[in-house]
Amino acid sequence: MSKTEPATLTVTADTVSAVDTVTRAAATPDVAQPYRELGLKDDEYAQIRKILGRRPTDAELAMYSVMWSEHCSYKSSKVHLSYFGTTTTPQMRSTMLAGIGENAGVVDIGDGWAVTFKVESHNHPSYVEPYQGAATGVGGIVRDILAMGARPVAVLDQLRFGPADAPDTARVVPGIVSGVGGYGNSLGLPNIGGEVVFDASFAGNPLVNAACIGVLRAKDMYTAHASGAGNKVVLYGSRTGLDGIGGVSVLASDTFSGDGSAGAGSNSRRKLPSVQVGDPFAEKVLIECTLEVFAADLVVGIQDLGGAGLSCATSELASAGDGGMHIWLDQVPLRATGMTPAEILSSESQERMCAVVTPDKVDEFLAVCEKWEVQADVIGEVTGTGRLVITFYDEIVVDVPPRTVAHEGPVYHRPVRRPDSQDALIADSTARLARPATMDEIRQLILTMIASPNLCSRSWVTDQYDRYVRGNTVLAQPSDSGVIRVSDESNLGVAMATDCNSRYTALDPYAGAQLALAEAYRNVVTTGATPTAVTNCLNFGSPEDPAVMWQFQQAVRGLADGCAQLGIPVTGGNVSFYNQTGQTAILPTPVVGVLGVIDDVRRRTITGIGQEAGETLILLGRTTDELDGSEWANVVHGHLGGRPPAVDLDAERKLGEILIAGSRDGMISAAHDLSEGGLAQAIIEMCLDGQTGARLVLPIDQGDVAGAFVALFAESTARVLVAVPRSEELRFTEMCQARQQPMIRIGVVDPAEPVLDIQHVAVLGLDELRAVWSATLPALFG
Amino acid sequence: MARVEVDVTIKPEILDPQGKAILGALGRTGHAGVIGVRQGKHFDLEVDDTVTDDELETIASTLLANSVIESWVIRRVASASTAQ
Amino acid sequence: MTASIGGARIGVITFPGTLDDVDAARAVKYAGAQAVPLWHADDDLKGVDAVIVPGGFSYGDYLRAGAISAHATVMRSVIDAARGGLPVLGICNGFQILAEAHLLPGVVMRNSGLRFLCRDQWLRVENTDTVWTSRYEPGAEILIPMKNAKGRYVADPGVIAELEAEGRVLMRYIGDGPAQGNPNGSLNDIAGICSADGRIAALMPHPEHAIDALTGPTDDGLGMFLSLVDSLLKV
């Protein structure tokens, strides 16, 4: 709105004279500063004073405090995350164009194309204001992807809520879902998958993770660095307002009387909500504008503005560059009056980007912004001083070595201790729980399970998301993974799935992270794509709790070791700590995202049966009595204890090779991964998705109720149910035998009748199944 | 019986994307003199005599407005006798 | 209105916030014509043979869906050309824009369910005698995606009666069951309408997202683009 929106900055003599400058800081070393309120510890504050050789100014204090926060500095997780680096081999690294430390990982997918993908959390803001919290979560991850030089092409969201029938769940679910949809839909990004999970541990702390995939030509990648003295720093996008500066408001002196002051002498900015309002329209325009400046080669380096706003963008750009940077803070276009330097630096106003542009291209850059009606201003330049200097009306308010802000923050070695209660948790297996005693009870259990909040239809959620926009969506929810066509010409595409079972992870964090990896990997291969890279979003409780740090450490090791075993690299990730209600932490939730590549999306494998005349159902993998931590134990007994299903990543890889070969050679007409809810859930979803009946013959003796129960509800891993056209059956089973893949012919597709007939166990009409499966979420949330 | 008007607007420090877009459109359509637009919602409530000012405040703060990002103004605009 | 040698040239407008312009352009290409990008701030229609006003959230749907775009520079040219007989199709947000620009009667309002709804929707093509629908058999039933938060067609009773009487209801929501039928409370189940001569048309569901069963539920939507190309090449 550069043409029409008036400048709102009004500077009074008070504003400037009240500013805490470097000169003043040097002259008044003993001024008490509210560093504790800003989250800094005594030794951290002392360290800042040591770095600067004086006390920090208000603006510097604001910068250090936010950049040294857990969220920005990874100070508790860094020592553990380094394990990803030590387990990544050069072979695994070979397709990585950018990895951990960049805005998002970038993977070469061949044909000159590259893909970037990442998951990020926006948990706490979504609890405070569900709609805006979720919306700005989507906005943030999309800008991360954009900052790599990529066009964002799809989003997926991983949502975890308290019990489905809890009153506060009814508050947050509609807001969060419509926030994800409202923002993503308005951006024109198809939502192709994700998770919706209900568990009591998320009651006061829902998890809102958002993933985004972007595509770019491999040669066009950008990174966040500011190099070349004399190059200009351009801030473009929305104006900077008081959004999200709640924390820094302790620095606002009573002298200021800008927006937000309720009365004389009151410091009402203390009361400002730390909520940001998203403007998806502004972000859509920002995307198109940014892609146009990329295409015209007008950018040297680029950084999105997210948490920590300009503090983060300027210090990271300068820190990653080869020199210093000078910022004229008075050139930042503002939305509120009387903002202080600390507030301008800390504002989390959305839909902003920061670019480094050579002087000869600044006019062209600004012209592109003007075409898209995007506000753009030169706010600084790259220097050779090695320092980040920020001035406000010619007064120096920040003068720091940028690396000390952005990359050399504190590192903690937090205590790690396996909690004593873990043994009791493991000992409390499902062996003592009552199992169904008759086939009638199993029939009823099937209906109870598919209607349960974690297994029922997600349509109430996913129908609020546009899955079609951009016209490249080959598969979307409820498919095992989302598949997006990258190239219209070659039909090259990518698949992505994200998974985590927090219950398994609570029982065994190391195995739980590997199970999340295994399931996401399996979901990708089930659609016919080859897993290529991994990202994560690690949601845990307080790092100050040694038991939580133990869960975290174990999960990181499990994931890293698992990726090494599968030979696919972790290209990036996100850590979210302090997810807890009071002293109670959430179940550990390391969400794992696996990206796959499919050379021809036309051969993708679908979920629904009935596409071919005459299909045989074959269950790949071994089923054993593994029900600890299962959805059955949760739904029927409200029980969590024992050991999670065994992980076998070699079996997962072998299974993957078979599914990919089956897709490539046209041997598989449908496939569906077995996970929560076991075989019963998988076959029902295949029937309902394909609107076709099936006959299932379980590998048990007639009347064996216990056997039927395990066959239908066990959650053993490395299993996929496939439908094979009769004409391909021999070829497919021979391939499985040659590769020693465990398999069992378990039924046939029966288009004649809309019925799932589990022989000698239960006969279920598809209408009845669909009715109970579909009714749950609408009944809960309207 | 009384008529009560409630105006809900986004708090001044919170971004109003709609107002911003409308302002842009006004500029493009030749109304350059307009320098600010904030969009809000207007509610007309018909209430009987049992509804107190406190209750109206509760209604506005908990339902009509999202107190995290919006502010509101309540006005009783007309009073009529309950006798018909 | 004769298409030039080398095929029909069909304009696709991009407003700030337009989303389905790439899809509309792809559908035009699938139908064998050339898609010509048109920019909202430019009054030049580049001599195109028809115009598609695509879907999205132009200007964020702020104020009213389509209200700000209806005043865009390009729309002045489109309105003039449409009154002169240029075929114009509005899809979703394009419908809202054409209604706000008064090229078609009525308004499109918030769904009765108050939520954004994305689903595959059955429609009946009620008028197959227009430049946009001639490829369909009379009464054809098609399945194409629908995705919007504001798709409820409303007009006063006189207008509805006139639309019905003149065969200007182009498409109607059909189907039984909870997941089909009228999705949003549109009067008379109206999904799309057209001008008296059938050259200006608009619908809320997205034919451009049903041009290939790989990326859509069917290829039922391609018929609209093929119909147009037929009419342009035939004249």
Image (spheres, grey):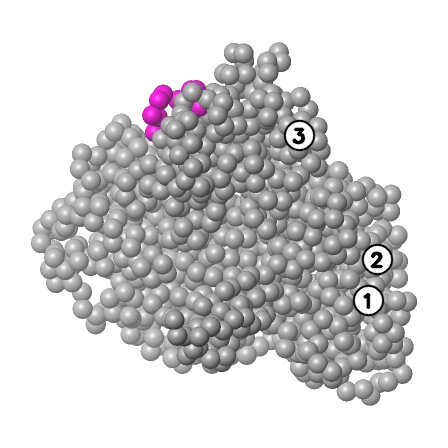
Q: Is residue A182 visible?
A: yes
- Which comes before the other along the chain, label 2 or label 1? 1
Left or right? Give the position of A67 relative to A191. right
Report whether mark 2 lies on the same chain as mark 1: yes
Label tally: 3
Q: Is residue A625 above or below residue A767?
A: below
| Callout in the foreground (3, 1) | 3
Amino acid residing under circle 3:
Ser
Identity of the residue drawn at 47% across and 72% down? B80
- Which of these two is toward me, B52 or A569? B52
- The circle drawn on residue A10 is 1
Q: Which quadrant is home to the C terminus of chain A?
A: bottom left
Left or right? Give the position of A601 relative to A236. left
Residue at numbered disc 3: C77
- Which of these two is toward me, A623 or C14? C14
Chain at numbered mark 1 = A
| Callout in the foreground (2, 1) | 1
| Callout in the foreground (3, 2) | 3
Amino acid residing under circle 1:
Thr
Please provide percent x and percent y for residue C58: 60, 43
Element marked by disc 2: strand
CA–CA distance between discs 3 and 2? 42 Å
